Image (spheres, rainbow, N blue to C red):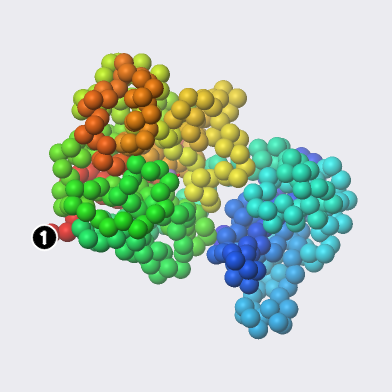
């Protein structure tokens, strides 16, 4: 973990930003998978990690925003616990590492929290276990807990977590570098006849070797047109593309989120290369457009116009690309947002509400298909770290539906699309830090031009 002064500084800023009341941040507990003794992999709550650095289950933290005093609640392991799980640093030792002022047993929390009355601030809980614990501690109903989170606390947490410090950027760079090595290995090892799961196991093995886990469910598929596709049961065949979207968490749980797309064969076909170059242009030019003061929604629309223009050159779209994007016609091919904040969560702070994280009073969410999925739209600031991840996909069901509905016939050349039904999808993604003057792509460069990718492919 970082030094105690890092966590003390974060907590004292949170206390002064909020100004009054008692802040309660619950850590996570082990979540049962099929019975209590067989839990899912433990993942600490990211805000709890941010403000304490402590990575064990069963803890909670309060911060008095008037005095700044911070208390850790939990219970030391019993001798029976130690027999089964081994010894751990005591709570007093953990509190010292995090610069916390005091330790109290968990059974004190209820009285302390209830004494704060309606001056209690907590974040929106996203796990059933946390809802139940908050209900028990506060004496409120489940419904009251679900509705009773503090918007003021959300804004104060988002304000801090959105701006990454140098020590956080170093952690994220480590995660991106490992993620990049995972992608290079997959691109080197993939070949006709292998299963997608052979490649996915390479990814998990490389994480395991570094004592970390993937930051989110691995997407590694010949069916790249399905955006969140976690099926790895297909056999790779000549002529297909493989889309890999995966990244590692650092040991302190900062995420990397990288996507590359490559052919099963040694070379891209001309048809694949044409579409790939459009996505690559969109990715490179969108990154180059990132700088403080620019709204990420405008960067998204810029990428969408590059995609519409490129697809027009290929003969799949037609008409004026500004008009096509304004109408939302490009979303047949690019139906998701250009990117999102990344940090301790791969979609950073999504548990606090996408609109609180990615939108502002002057940039509101659109309800247009495609643009509505944009997670980050507001003006960029130095210290933001975000993903840039344009893509072009051929989703047969969506093409059929739009054609049947005669949608955007001024902008889409449906007859030319027939030959692309089985094309799959292409996405290219890097993680980008906004600097005072512009941007910096995190980590060592990960091959992404056609020539760089083909140079990695196996030689038959
Ligand atoms: N890495 C998957 C996503 O950003 O949704
Ligand atoms: Mn992403």
Toward the left, the furthest residue is 460
SS of the residue under disc 1: loop
Is 11 left, or right, of 371 in this rendering? right
Among the 4 quarters of the image, the one containing residue 389: top left
Q: Residue at x 84, y 62 (%)?
A: 108
Position in image of residue 279 (x %, y %): 29, 36
Is 88 left, or right, of 442 in this rendering? right
Q: Which residue is drawn at 33% across and 51% down?
A: 221
Q: Nearer the viewer, residue 272 or 394?
A: 394
Is residue 291 at least partly visible in the picture? no
Vertical position of residue 227 compared to residue 74: above or below: above
Is 355 left, or right, of 328 in this rendering? right
Is residue 340 at least partly visible in the picture? yes
The local crowd at label 1, few if under 14, some if 14 to 19, many if 20 or more residues have their Cα within 10 Å, is: few
Is 379 left, or right, of 153 in this rendering? left
- Ligand 2 shows up in the quarter that is top left
Vertical position of residue 317 compared to residue 233: above or below: above
Q: Which of 65 and 283 is in front in this view?
A: 283
Position in image of residue 1 (x %, y %): 56, 62
Among the 4 quarters of the image, the one containing residue 269: top left
Q: Which residue is drawn at 57% across and 44% down?
A: 349
Q: Mark 1 points at which residue?
A: 460
Q: Which residue is drawn at 51% across and 52% down?
A: 168
Among the 4 quarters of the image, the one containing residue 82: bottom right
Position in image of residue 60 (x %, y %): 72, 58
Position in image of residue 438 (x %, y %): 40, 34
């Amino acid at each position: 973990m970082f030094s105690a002064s890092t966590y003390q500084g974060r907590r004292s800023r949170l206390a002064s930003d909020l100004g009054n009341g008692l802040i309660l941040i619950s850590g996570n507990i082990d979540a049962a998978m099929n019975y209590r003794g067989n839990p899912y992999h433990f993942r600490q709550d990211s805000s709890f990690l941010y403000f304490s650095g402590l990575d064990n289950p069963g803890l909670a933290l309060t911060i008095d925003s008037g005095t700044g005093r911070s208390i850790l609640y939990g219970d030391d392991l019993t001798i029976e616990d130690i027999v089964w799980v081994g010894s751990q640093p005591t709570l007093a030792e953990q509190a010292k590492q995090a610069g916390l002022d005091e330790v109290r047993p968990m059974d004190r929390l209820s009285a302390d929290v209830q004494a704060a009355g309606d001056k209690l601030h907590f974040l929106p809980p996203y796990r059933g276990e946390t809802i139940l614990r908050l209900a028990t501690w506060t004496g409120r109903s489940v419904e009251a807990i679900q509705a009773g989170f503090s918007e003021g606390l959300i804004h104060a947490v988002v304000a801090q977590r959105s701006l990454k410090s140098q020590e956080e950027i170093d952690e994220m760079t480590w995660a991106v570098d490992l993620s990049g090595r995972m992608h290079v290995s997959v691109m080197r090892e993939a070949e006709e006849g292998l299963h997608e799961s052979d490649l996915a196991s390479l990814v998990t093995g490389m994480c395991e070797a570094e004592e970390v886990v993937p930051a989110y469910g691995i997407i590694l598929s010949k069916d790249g047109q399905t955006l969140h596709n976690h099926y790895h049961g297909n056999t790779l065949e000549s002529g297909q593309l493989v889309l890999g979207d995966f990244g590692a968490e650092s040991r302190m749980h900062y995420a990397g989120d990288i996507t590359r797309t490559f052919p099963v064969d040694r070379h891209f076909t001309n048809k694949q290369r044409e579409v790939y170059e459009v996505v690559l242009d969109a990715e490179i030019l969108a990154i180059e457009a990132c700088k403080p003061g620019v709204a990420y929604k405008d960067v998204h629309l810029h990428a969408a116009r590059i995609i519409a223009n490129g697809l027009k050159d290929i003969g799949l779209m037609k008409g004026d690309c500004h008009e096509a994007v304004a109408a939302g016609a490009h979303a047949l091919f690019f139906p998701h947002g250009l990117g999102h904040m990344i940090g301790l969560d791969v979609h950073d702070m999504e548990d606090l509400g996408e609109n609180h994280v990615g939108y502002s009073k002057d940039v509101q969410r659109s309800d247009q298909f495609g643009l509505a999925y944009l997670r980050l739209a507001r003006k960029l600031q130095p210290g933001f770290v975000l993903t840039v991840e344009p893509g072009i996909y051929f989703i047969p069901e969506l093409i059929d539906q739009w054609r049947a509905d005669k949608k955007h016939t001024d902008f889409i050349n449906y007859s030319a699309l027939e030959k692309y039904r089985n094309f799959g999808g292409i996405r290219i993604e890097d993680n980008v830090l906004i600097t005072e003057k512009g941007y910096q792509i995190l980590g060592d460069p990960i091959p992404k031009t056609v020539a760089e990718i083909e140079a990695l492919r196996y030689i038959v």
